[in-house]
């Protein structure tokens, strides 16, 4: 009996002992954690994701201490080439401006990019400013100072939000620019999405920006936005996915598309994808193959779980391009493709 | 030594052999003890040295890029990679000052009440409460500050301060609105609560060391309670009180999480203490995880070095002050 038990254990161990580690962006952490749990239940293999921030994720994958890194701000083609990395988008989220104005209900206030930039630069400082009134003829806006709330910690959310403002306002681009943290002209800084949501809900006359999920959970008044095509859109799954579908994913190496200000009548202008980084020739082929199996599983079976948490799955056309990229680019030391091998 | 003496009470040749062996054992034991303690002391120095070297090395790229003007540069722009330390340094000092201004009188007052005036049955509950206050983790203060304290200040205290000091020339700019709830003043108040137990419990401990005979003599001369406190207790325990205050100041300068939650985190120097600001440790905690690029990371390390130097000088100044006092009193 003991011998039989040992033999079984010897066979079972290699399959059960796989523990893949990844690290990086905090924005997708909740969905990665949920996926990892479901994946473990199905396959017995664990995915250990450390939410240490995009900067940390990039550093760790370059240092080869993890099987995959995760970042909200995509790396450029040159940098990917230099370090022999492959980059692909995993899941998306929407970023929405939220306001706290007496009598203004969720989705009632309409803003456009230029006005939003002026508000966050302090050039528009009162809610009854003519520029806001022009967009909202049917709302009775109070004469009240605008309190700007923004993130204090470096974050992918800030990167995408400031990237959008840079695309729609030349002034913003030259004076502030875009990064995970910027030199904000006005406003108070709050820590994390939850901090911004909390400050906006506490402060009358305030405006902030948060991940869509936080706006929904905290029952904050989100705004509508005028998109690149001049259409007024609501932040919902459909408009986030429209932005992703309308983006030109093939024109840039590493899918380094920032999904802001995308064309299309239905596109929500501040949509954000979050990215995974892996080595083209991973040090541990077995781990890398298992990580790819996890990502494949997440694309095909993880959609419902993602939507439960208010994330948006990648559209099918993007997924198939990514899978082709895996098959052609990620190889073990002997040159054998790890993705097809794992199937 | 006592058992050695006992062993030697009956003198014989075998006993004298024993004696030298025992003496050698004592010598070895003493030497070992000396080296173990010396080793511990040197370890502290080595660790401290390591920290200093690592901080200096890490901050070199920043100082190379900006020179010494990093110290008084006001911009903090990750996009153009232009960094200056003045705003966080200013915030660190102002919040600590507000904290000490509030915590010192309340802390010493509490300690005096506990040792001189408090009825014995009340001493234990108040003493325990103070120690509990010191034991609360700072993140709890931060959450409490953000969700409970800041909204309270925003709706009551801050509008009152703005309208009270509005007509007074200089103070009107120190208390200029709008009331955000969070900001430099809120951070200072939270810090005051956090350092209060340090000041209070150390003051209480040193007050209890005042010999009863000194106080009784003063009372015997007809001194009032206030005069005893003012002329006997405080002068007798001055060194200890300063030690407690410095310990509190040290915590206030370096406190991170609670401050990050309530200070508003704006790299800005505003005259008004109701406006958002930032501190050195809050800036590092906020931005380190997502800082990409050598100059950015290095600037954050350089901030750490500056905080280290500030703390060092505060402690050194405290030592100097204590030495002067000791010399004057001839103690």
Image: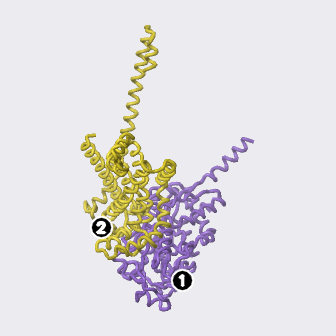
Chain colours: A purple, B yellow
Label number found at residue B82: none
In the shown orientation, is residue B282 left or right of residue B316? Answer: right
- Name the foreground residue: B306 vs A90: B306
Q: How many numbered tags mark residues here?
A: 2
- Element under label 2? loop
Residue drawn at x 43%, y 52% is B113
- Name the foreground residue: A1 vs B191: B191
Residue A243 visible, this angle: yes
Residue labelled with disc 2? B74
Rendering coords of residue A224 (x, y %): 51, 83
| Viewport quadrant of the N terminus of chain A | top right
Residue labelled with disc 1? A105
- Element under label 1? loop
- Name the foreground residue: B316 vs A181: B316
Residue drawn at x 55%, y 61% is A337
Please state the chain letter of the residue tagged with numbered disc 2 in the rendered image: B
For the residues labelled 1 and 2, say whether their Cβ atoms are less than 8 Å apart. Answer: no
Labels 1, 2: one chain: no
Rendering coords of residue B187 (x, y %): 41, 63
Rendering coords of residue A57 (x, y %): 47, 61
Task: Sort mark 2 into few (<14), some (14-19) or many (20+) by Cα contacts within 10 Å.
Answer: some
Q: Is residue A93 above or below residue A52?
A: below
Farthest top residue in view: B12
Please state the chain letter of the residue tagged with numbered disc 1 in the rendered image: A
Rendering coords of residue A58 (x, y %): 45, 61
Residue drawn at x 40%, y 83% is A126
């Amino acid at each position: 009996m003991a011998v039989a038990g040992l033999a079984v254990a010897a066979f079972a161990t290699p399959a059960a002992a796989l523990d893949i580690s990844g690290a990086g962006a905090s924005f997708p952490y909740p969905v990665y954690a949920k996926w990892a749990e479901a994946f473990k239940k199905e396959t017995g293999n664990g995915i250990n994701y450390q939410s240490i921030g995009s900067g940390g994720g990039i550093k760790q994958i370059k240092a080869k201490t993890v099987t995959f890194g995760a970042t909200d701000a995509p790396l450029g083609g040159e940098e990917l080439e230099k370090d022999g990395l492959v980059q692909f988008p995993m899941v998306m989220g929407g970023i929405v401006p939220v306001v706290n104005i007496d009598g203004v209900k969720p989705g009632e206030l309409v803003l456009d990019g230029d006005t939003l930039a002026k508000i966050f630069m302090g050039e528009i400082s009162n809610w009854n400013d003519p520029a806001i009134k022009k967009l909202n003829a049917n709302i009775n806006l109070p004469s009240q100072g605008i309190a700007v709330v923004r993130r204090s910690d470096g974050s992918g959310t800030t990167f995408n939000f400031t990237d959008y403002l840079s695309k729609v306002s030349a002034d913003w681009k030259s004076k502030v620019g875009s990064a995970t943290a910027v030199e904000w002209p006005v406003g108070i800084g709050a820590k994390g999405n939850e901090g911004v949501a909390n400050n906006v809900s506490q402060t009358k006359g305030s405006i902030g920006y948060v991940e869509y999920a936080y706006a929904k959970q905290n029952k904050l008044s989100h705004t509508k936005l005028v998109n690149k095509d001049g259409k007024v859109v609501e932040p919902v799954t459909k408009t986030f996915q429209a932005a992703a579908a309308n983006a030109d994913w093939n024109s840039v190496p590493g899918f380094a598309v920032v999904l802001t200000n995308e064309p299309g009548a239905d596109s929500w202008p501040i949509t954000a994808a979050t990215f995974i980084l892996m080595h083209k020739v991973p040090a541990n082929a077995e781990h890398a193959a298992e990580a790819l199996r996890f990502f494949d599983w997440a694309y095909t079976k993880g959609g419902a779980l993602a939507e439960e948490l208010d994330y948006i799955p990648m559209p099918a056309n993007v997924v198939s391009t990514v899978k082709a990229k895996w098959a052609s680019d990620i190889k073990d030391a002997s040159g054998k493709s790890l993705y097809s091998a794992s199937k | 030594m006592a058992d050695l003496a006992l062993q030697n009470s009956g003198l014989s040749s075998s006993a004298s052999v024993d004696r030298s062996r025992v003496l050698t054992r004592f010598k070895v034991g003493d030497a070992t003890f000396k080296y173990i303690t010396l080793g511990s002391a040197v370890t502290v120095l080595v660790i401290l040295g390591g920290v200093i070297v690592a901080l200096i090395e890490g901050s070199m790229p920043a100082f190379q890029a900006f020179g010494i003007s990093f110290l008084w540069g006001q911009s903090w722009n990750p996009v153009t990679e232009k960094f200056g330390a003045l705003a966080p340094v200013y915030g660190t000092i102002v919040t600590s000052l507000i904290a000490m201004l509030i915590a010192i009188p309340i802390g010493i007052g509490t300690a005096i009440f506990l040792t001189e005036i408090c009825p014995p049955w009340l001493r234990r509950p108040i003493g325990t409460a103070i120690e509990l206050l010191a034991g609360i983790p700072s993140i709890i203060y931060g959450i409490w500050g953000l969700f409970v304290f800041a909204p309270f200040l925003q709706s009551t205290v801050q509008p009152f301060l703005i309208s009270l000091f509005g007509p007074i020339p200089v103070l009107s700019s120190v208390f200029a609105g709008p009331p955000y709830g969070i900001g430099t003043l809120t951070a200072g108040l939270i810090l005051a609560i956090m350092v209060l137990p340090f000041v209070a419990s150390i003051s209480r401990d040193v007050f209890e060391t005042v010999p009863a005979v000194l106080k009784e003599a003063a009372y015997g001369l007809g001194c009032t309670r206030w005069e005893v406190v003012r002329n006997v207790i405080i002068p007798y325990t001055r060194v200890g009180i300063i030690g407690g205050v410095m310990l509190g100041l040290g915590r206030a300068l370096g406190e991170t999480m609670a401050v990050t939650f309530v200070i508003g985190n704006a790299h800005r120097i505003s005259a008004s203490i109701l406006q958002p600001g930032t501190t050195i440790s809050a800036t590092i905690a906020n931005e380190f995880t997502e800082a990409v690029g050598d100059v950015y990371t290095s600037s954050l390390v350089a901030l750490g070095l500056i905080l280290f130097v500030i703390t060092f000088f505060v402690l050194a100044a405290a030592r100097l002050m204590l030495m002067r006092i000791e010399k004057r009193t001839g103690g």
